[in-house]
Amino acid sequence: MYKPFEIKENLFYVGVNDRTKHLFENLWPLPKGVSYNSYIINDEKVALIDTVDICYADVFFNKTGSVLGDKKIDYLVVNHMEPDHSGAIGLLKTRYPDIKIVGNSRTADMLKGYYGITDNLLIIEDKEELKLGKNTLQFYLTPMVHWPETMMTYVKESKTLFSADAFGTFGTLDGGVTDTQLEPDRYRDEMIRYYSNIVGKFGSPVQAALKKLNGVGIETICSTHGPIWTQPDSISKVVSLYDKLSRYESENGMVIAYGSMYGNTEQLAEIIAASAAENGARNIVMHNVSKSHESEVLRDIFKYRGLIIGSPTYNNKPYPGVESLLSALQNRNVKNRFFGYFSGHTWADGAKRELKAFAEAMEFEMVCESVEMKQSLNDNVTENAYALGKAMAEKLNSGDAVVPHKTICH
Ligand code: FEO
């Protein structure tokens, strides 16, 4: 029998760690695993907040049993229907047939579609309240953070926010579950990777949610993934990080992401990076898209203000890994970046054509003319590559704000 972990009076952690899956959503690597967090408020009426991935249902029910014994669960609050959190709902209904499921109208549609559940629902509206006893739940609809039904649940008395995916991170909870038991800084990069990979497309809805929560006193954040944030300093840091990322704000630094078949385009990348360093750029991160997972490339692009992308031409298109990255960046509406690009080709310049179209489509500021290489390096190409690295370094160190669609030629 598990010893239930009590986060605060009558609030218990019943989530699980997943150190088995290699890929979250069957897409995003999990080198440090992930947790699926679930919580019980054990009041006069018992509320369970979200469930876990179906693979961990047994562990999950052992944990709920350790808190409740034979006591029934009155409400399941579904903040988010993605199956990493809703997966155990079907089994939960068989164990607790009288449980009332709390959600909004979008939740109801998904409960029916995924699990065939249509009865015993409590459909709430934005800001509606539900009294459990000493605890009053208040529901905040926060659509598209990360799905349309997503909502957050706030306990008015304890100022605890159950935030669904928001403020979540990759990385398991090793031993402890709260920021006081864990090392919060260890999760920062994984929070950026989680945000950029999973929620990154939804900057505007995240901003709308933060605006809605502004003024709501929050003393504890219980996300569906990663540590429980209890300390004012941690809460301020994670809220400010989400605010910054959802406004596409970034740090001083640059990413050079490139593809290369035989090393010629890679040599261009090396020259650009060396020139940037020589001219004062710091935090230069280089990603060979054939080796770095796109998950890490996206994380670093969300992190840093400078972006240079390079590609050889392949079947008259950008190199496949680069093409995928361009699509991922457009899909996430990435904004506010200083930008440059370079291309290589042997007889047809499809990579250059598509990089140019990408640059025009995004709200980036071009720091310099693009660099074009036919077959291999020569003096002129080398000079242009130096100019691109230098222009990026100067822009990054200028303190200037990004001017969307502006092109500066040196
Ligand atoms: Fe953790 Fe959007 O699910």
Image: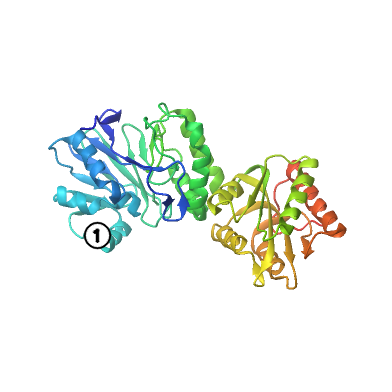
Q: Which residue is at 20% across, 60% downward?
A: 118
* Vertical relation: 23 (above or below) 228: below
Report the side of 148 relative to 361 (left or right).
left
Q: Label 1 belongs to which residue?
A: 115
Q: Secondary structure at mark 1?
A: helix
User: Quadrant of the rendered structure where residue 398 is?
Assistant: top right
Residue sitting at 68 percent across and 61 percent down? 311
Q: Nearer the viewer, residue 284 or 37?
A: 284
In the image: residue 378, left or right of residue 128 = right
Instruction: Say if residue 80 shows up in the picture.
Output: no
Asked if the residue at label 1 sits under 8 Å from ligand 1, the reply is: no
Kind of residue sitting beneath label 1: Tyr
| Vertical side of 275 occupied by 347: above or below | below
Residue 319: image x %, image y %? 63, 64
| In the depicted structure, whether residue 260 falls above or below residue 235 | below
Quadrant, the C terminus: bottom right
Residue drawn at the location 30% of the way across and 55% of the way down? 104
Front residue of this view, candidates 402 and 318: 318
Question: How many marks do you count on the picture?
Answer: 1
Residue 126 picture location, percent across and down: 34, 50
Seen in the image, is 353 located left or right of residue 179? right
- Quarter holding residue 65: top left
Which is nearer the eye, 158 or 14?
14
- As drawn, the residue found furthest toward the left would be 70
Q: The N terminus appears in which quarter of the rendering? A: top left
Examine the rendering and report whether any part of residue 200 can be seen: yes
Q: Position of residue 247 (x, y in %)?
A: 57, 48
* Residue sitting at the far front: 262
Counting from the top left corner in percent of width and height, residue 202 is at: 49, 54
